[in-house]
Amino acid sequence: MPKGIWRTVACVAAAAATLAVPAVAAAPTGIRAEVALQRAILAEINAVRKAHRLAPLRLSGGLTRAAEGHSLAMARLGFFSHSSRDGTVFWKRISRSYPYRGYATWTVGENLLWSSSRLDGATAVRMWLNSPPHRKVLLGARWRELGISAVRADAAPGAFGGSDVTLVTADFGLRR
């Protein structure tokens, strides 16, 4: 791991709220990507960043793959956490798709949300802005790239109690 990564990751992880829930065998029916919501969240994040005189974020394939995998796992397995189901911390999970090898600087952050009501991009971003740790990540000046995944599950198990839910993962990154 490049020098300085641990400090950055530890700060972001300390700011992130985590809720672990027990495993549930039932699998949800009907999980689908909410592509329009993903686009709306990206546009809203960049509008908010512009209003705060921060650089806009560009989509990253690696961060998007990491976000998609995590949103789908949470929907299928019924948990809501920055850590993976097997306990892997978020930055290690993200590094599989957004590697740090070969970069002098590498840092990542993550915002999550879930809702049983319909979301639009403005509502999702407003929810993060109203939470100090999520706001800190969203308005981080160092970020240059973003991966977003929004999925809708008709009957998500576990923590979601079989409800119809939308889960959003936003993975932020910088590599130089």
Image (cartoon, rainbow, N blue to C red):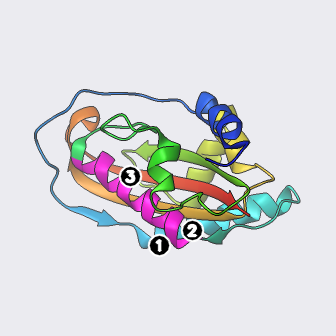
Residue occupied by mark 1: 36
- Magenta stretch, residue numbers: 60-76
Location of residue 22 (image quadrant): top left
Horizontal side of residue 11 vs 124, given as left or right: right
Q: Secondary structure at mark 3?
A: helix
Q: Nearer the viewer, mark 1 or mark 3?
A: 3
For the residue carrying disc 3, how many other residues have a C-alpha within 10 Å: few (<14), some (14-19), or many (20+)? many
Location of residue 29 (image quadrant): bottom left
Residue lying farthest to the left in this orientation: 26
Q: Amino acid at mark 1?
A: Ala
- Nearest the viewer among 16 and 95 is 95
Q: Amino acid at mark 3?
A: His
Task: Please name the predominant secondary structure of the magenta segment in the image.
Answer: helix
Q: Amino acid at mark 2?
A: Ala
Residue occupied by mark 2: 40
Q: Secondary structure at mark 1?
A: helix
Q: How many numbered marks have been drawn onto this rendered protein structure?
A: 3
Q: Secondary structure at mark 2?
A: helix
Above or below, 168 against 136 in this view is: below
Residue 24 x %, y %: 16, 34
Residue occupied by mark 3: 70
Horizontal side of residue 98 vs 102, given as left or right: left
Residue 74 magenta-highlighted: yes
